[in-house]
Amino acid sequence: MTRRLLLAAAMALAIVPAAQAQVAAAPGATPTSADAVRQKAALPLAGRTVLIDPGHNGGNSSHHEITGKQVWVGTLWKDCDADGAATNAGYSEAQHNWDVALVLRGLLRAQGARVVLTRTSNTGVGPCITQRAAAGNRAHADAAVSIHADGNSNGSDHGFHVILPADVGQSAAMLRRSQQLGTDIRDALREQGPTAVSNYIGEDGLIVRNDLGGLNLSKVPKVFTEIGNMHSPSDAPQIESAAGRRLEAAAIAAGLTRFLTRRRA
């Protein structure tokens, strides 16, 4: 081959990759699987695992032979699980917790997180509070949150609070990270949640408890959210409405994102 032909061939080989790159970057080009992987990796919660624990379950009240069994939660013996509260109109806490968990799962997945739920429907029984904690430990969750609503009988009591774990033998890192997680979620609920800070329990929306197996037995950062009093005339409409539950889920998601994307101390 002449020198002129060799130069022409080399130029042709150099042009092909450049042309391919232009086609790949052209507007309207179909994304490849590699593009999708890169896009997901760029999401803020990519590589993070979140455990969502919707408290109680819809079938608990019909199966006390299961939920009434005693389990050790690190500080005392308790029922395996509980029925949960309900609004005066009959909207159950178990249903609320499940409804919020599904919205929250979608929001977190959209940001790239792997999400694990402690139950798969609102028609089952349990799982026991010990198993709920074990699920987060098994998943090596970066953060875990248990969704609840309170059932205080005094209708003038209203507002949300976030429950933090007491020191009952967990690691110092778990307790420190749980404190930060709870504070971030409290701040987000205060900024954009559907209910005000509690006027009847905790201090500035936070309280520490040592009687909850879901916190006592957790090895990963975990908190409980209690979005309000289901018997409160101001809280109940927010708890019962889809719009109120979306605000709740969005605020919890914002708190989780703040926690999971901040630089660790």
Image (spheres, rainbow, N blue to C red):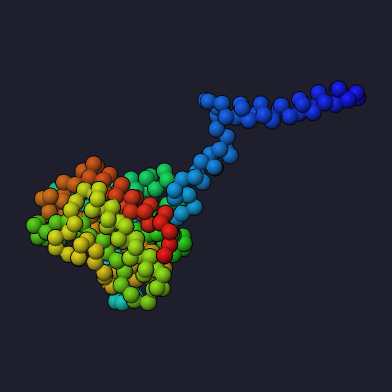
Measuring from the top left, give residue 194's x and y in whole percent. 21, 48
Side of 156 relative to 222 (left or right): left
Q: Is residue 34 above or below residue 48?
A: above
Q: Quadrant of residue 220?
A: bottom left
Residue located farthest toward the right when viewing the structure as drawn? 1
Taking the image as drawn, is residue 31 in sight? yes
Q: How many marks?
A: 0
Side of 87 relative to 103 (left or right): left
Q: Quadrant of the C terminus?
A: bottom left
Measuring from the top left, give residue 16's x and y in whole percent. 71, 27
At 45% from the left and 55% from the top, the residue drawn is 49
Measuring from the top left, give residue 245's x and y in whole percent. 25, 46
At 55% from the left and 29% from the top, the residue drawn is 30
Measuring from the top left, give residue 41's x and y in whole percent. 51, 46
**Front residue of this view, candidates 38 and 131:** 38
At 10% from the left and 50% from the top, the residue drawn is 233
**Front residue of this view, candidates 20 and 253:** 20
Q: Quadrant of residue 149?
A: bottom left
Q: Quadrant of residue 116?
A: bottom left
Q: Quadrant of the N terminus?
A: top right
Taking the image as drawn, is residue 122 in sight? no
At 36% from the left and 70% from the top, the residue drawn is 175
